[in-house]
Amino acid sequence: MEIEKQALEGEEFTKYANNMPKLWKERATGYHVTRIDYNTWVFEVITRNHGLKGGNKHVVLLQDRTCTCNKWQTYQVPCFHILACCASVVLQYTRFVSEWYKLENVKKVYLGKFHPIHDKKAWPLLGEFPRVVANEDIPKKPGRRKLTRYKSEMDYQEKGKETTSSAS
């Protein structure tokens, strides 16, 4: 019903795909965009400075649908840098939103019939899974384990830290 309501309101994409760029549009203003290659739509985007943050350089490849921030590849919705590129060459950013978020495709998910399984005893049985146990022969090192994940800009924004600090 919600999808039908959005379609009647003239929306093409889901609420998520519509709201995300609206939130990011304000942040994308003031970015310095340089078009590097006119044939393959390669751009260099330098973010605006605000406080101790900003001034970062990102490369956007519109034809390949990639940005060095990786938000576009992850969320399949144009990131700040894509919005800035689209604004600089007067392109509709909606052409870079994934097909996943089109209302007509989301509607197809719910076309099938769903039937609840009433009793836990009627649930389908799954095969045996191998049990994974830690190897006791490998000695544990003293102290706290080192993180293997590199922190991104989002980690620092949430905690109010500088983006120039090293990843742990």
Image (cartoon, rainbow, N blue to C red):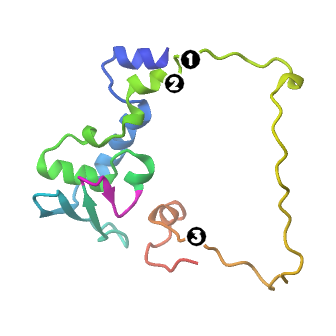
State whether residue 47 appears in this view. no
Seen at 89% across and 76% down, the residue is 136
- Who comes first in sequence, dot 2 or dot 3? 2
Within 10 Å of disc 1 (Cα), the crowding (few <14, some 14-19, many 20+) is: few
Q: Quadrant of residue 52?
A: bottom left
Within the magenta stretch, is there residue 63?
Answer: yes
Pointer 1: what residue?
112
Query: Residue 117: percent from the left, percent from the top?
Result: 78, 19
Q: Amino acid at mark 1?
A: Gly
- The CA span between labels 3 and 1 is 39 Å
Which residue is nearer to you in this view: 51 or 39?
39
Name the mark on residue 149. Answer: 3
- The CA span between labels 2 and 3 is 34 Å
Element carrying mark 2: helix
Image-based side of 33 in relation to 105, left or right: left
Which residue is nearer to you in this view: 113 or 152?
113
Query: Residue 75: percent from the left, percent from the top?
Result: 44, 47
- Looking at the rendering, the stretch of residues picked out in magenta corresponds to 62-70
Q: Amino acid at mark 3?
A: Arg
- Who comes first in sequence, dot 3 or dot 1? 1
Magenta span main SS: loop
Query: Residue 120: percent from the left, percent from the top?
Result: 86, 25
Which residue is nearer to you in this view: 45 or 62?
62
Seen at 28% across and 56% down, the residue is 81
Q: How many marks?
A: 3
